[in-house]
Amino acid sequence: MSDAEMRRLGTRARGTDGGIVVVGAGLAGLFTALKLAPLPVTVVSGAPFGEGGSSFWAQAGIAAAVGEGDSPEAHAADTVEAGAGIVEDSIAELMAREARMRVEELLEYGVPFDRDLEGKLALGQEAAHTSRRILHVKGDTAGKAIMQALIEAVRATPSITVMDGWNAGDLLLSDGRVAGIALHSADQNRPKRRILPARAVVLATGGAGQLYAVTTNPAQSKGEGVAVAARAGAVIADAEFVQFHPTALAIGADPAPLATEALRGEGAHLIDKSGKRFMRGVHPDAELAPRDIVARAVHRQVVSGAGAFLDLRPFGATLAKRFPTVHASCLAAGIDPAVEPVPVAPAAHYHMGGVLTDADGRTSVDGLWACGEVASTGAHGANRLASNSLLEAVVFGARVAEDVSATMQNYRGDAAPAFDYDEPAARDDTRRIRLLRQTMAAKAGVVRDEQSLREVLRVIAELERSHPDRPLKNMLTTAKLIAAAAFARHESRGAHFRSDYPEANPALARRSFFTLEEADSVARDAVGGEEARPGVVTALHA
Ligand SMILES: Cc1cc2nc3c(=O)[nH]c(=O)nc-3n(C[C@H](O)[C@H](O)[C@H](O)COP(=O)(O)OP(=O)(O)OC[C@H]3O[C@@H](n4cnc5c(N)ncnc54)[C@H](O)[C@@H]3O)c2cc1C
């Protein structure tokens, strides 16, 4: 959409008085919409309602200090420790403090968290948590169970209108504030653009794992929310910090099935080809070391050819009952985990960075909020503590709802209706997307350096010159923000590992903040005006 057209639509949308639009129907989006009730809200989702997004796939569960001997202070301290020096302490503290309240609400919505024989909530152990504090459902099906309960609650809430099959395009701004959002129909046979007037837009579009060739994230996690916000002028924080899950099943599937960390929490070991436990020599906590350390060790094993396997044999026949999802994925790949170790590799899993928000989920753009994985609240720093992301989604979803409600005091659901336009079908960018994902995985992945990041930025620049449609256009924007921030951070910290700066630099123990304009400038300097190498991308123009 041209700038002039955006301004015209923004002015028109402003004149019509908009409502509340939540983009994304994962945990963050649905929790926000439920907490906004009875205020009328439209939930937009590209995928059909009840599908799409990472929340359904969460295996281990949600972290909350609700066990005896545990405390929010201890949970916050573990979160800060895992975040490698750049967690916002106050955010970690309020998230840990509000966890119990949000868990009680999830129980009220009917989430059947596992209980022990005395009927108390059963708590699991995960890496880098100093207490057992992970609430789970039937072993490894927490995400699905939570989402099922919330979907039922949404269906029973008349103030929530679900508009699925629509992907978010650009935000419409008027006088610097959000006036609406442009949507594109997901049905390519009937391409349409819809303008939704809105006074408040909440981005809850999830993560960005699909920017990488090897990822645990579902197809919808393309990082589009970050791009949409950045183009509207929002500040993006900590973009360089992408968490790679150390143990995705290396069976050639896209997305790669996850072998949850809880397996290691319950005693599964990582071994090499010869059966030796390789994490013992890497970190005192061995398999329960922080994720980034385990991910790099697994990466080294894979690259060197020594092999990395998860040994699930000690679980024997109990694996199917205790971890049904992992068990089923192994069997589907023709591996019987009761008799042979399972090959694993690191995979892009969680984006700590995202749209900068304050404690109420407000972004730097007036009228725009963000929560869930698309946001960067400062809770995760350089490395997310396992099972803190479902928690972050509900804690900040509730806070966003409270803040939006306060802003929309006189709103009674009298928002102007949407207006539709026909538009041409988007071009098929499948090959360009594949190139971007492969480049990101090889050059901006578990290990990066100046040269590899330069190459990523060069490929992005050339792909941008090929006039991409969405979703590639959005993917390129978010990939550029990640690569530019990684290029600019001359140290290794948490999930960001630079082989040319392998140590953390105490002077750089601070978060990163980039507007799109600033990322563009870093990218231009990095590429240094060089033309892209002939043949890299040009072959794809055919
Ligand atoms: C395999 C796996 C296991 C995990 N296990 C755990 C765990 O045990 N504990 C934990 O805390 N975290 C876990 N995580 C991370 C956690 O699941 C996510 O961080 C969290 O669910 C994100 O929730 P969300 O609501 O922000 O996004 P999502 O659940 O990803 O939802 C995003 C929504 O936005 C929609 N959307 C995306 N782009 C657009 C667009 N352009 N227009 C319109 N709609 C759009 C999607 O269709 C979807 O409805 C796991 C992640 C994965 C992939």
Image (cartoon, rainbow, N blue to C red):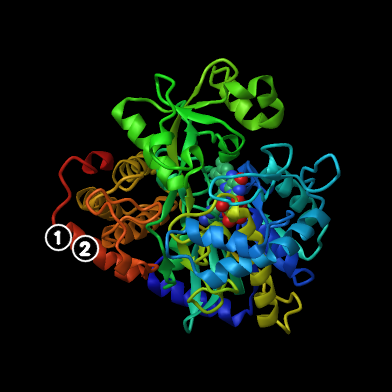
- Residue 185 visible in the snapshot: no
List x then y, in percent, for residue 332.
58, 22
Q: Secondary structure at mark 1?
A: loop
**As rendered, which of 366 and 393 lies closer to the eye?**
393
- CB under 8 Å between discs 2 and 1: yes
Residue that mark 1 sits on = 529
Q: Tell whether circle 2 marks a residue whose Cβ is less than 8 angstroms from ligand 1.
A: no
Three-letter amino acid code at disc 1? Gly
**Is 542 placed above or below 272 here?**
below
Residue that mark 2 sits on = 524
Three-letter amino acid code at disc 2? Arg
**As rendered, which of 2 and 421 lies closer to the eye?**
2
Rendered residue at 73%/54% (across/down):
67
Rendered residue at 76%/78% (across/down):
412
Q: Is residue 346 left or right of residue 80?
A: left
Quarter of the image with the N terminus in it? bottom left
Q: Secondary structure at mark 2?
A: helix
**As rendered, which of 200 and 192 lies closer to the eye?**
200
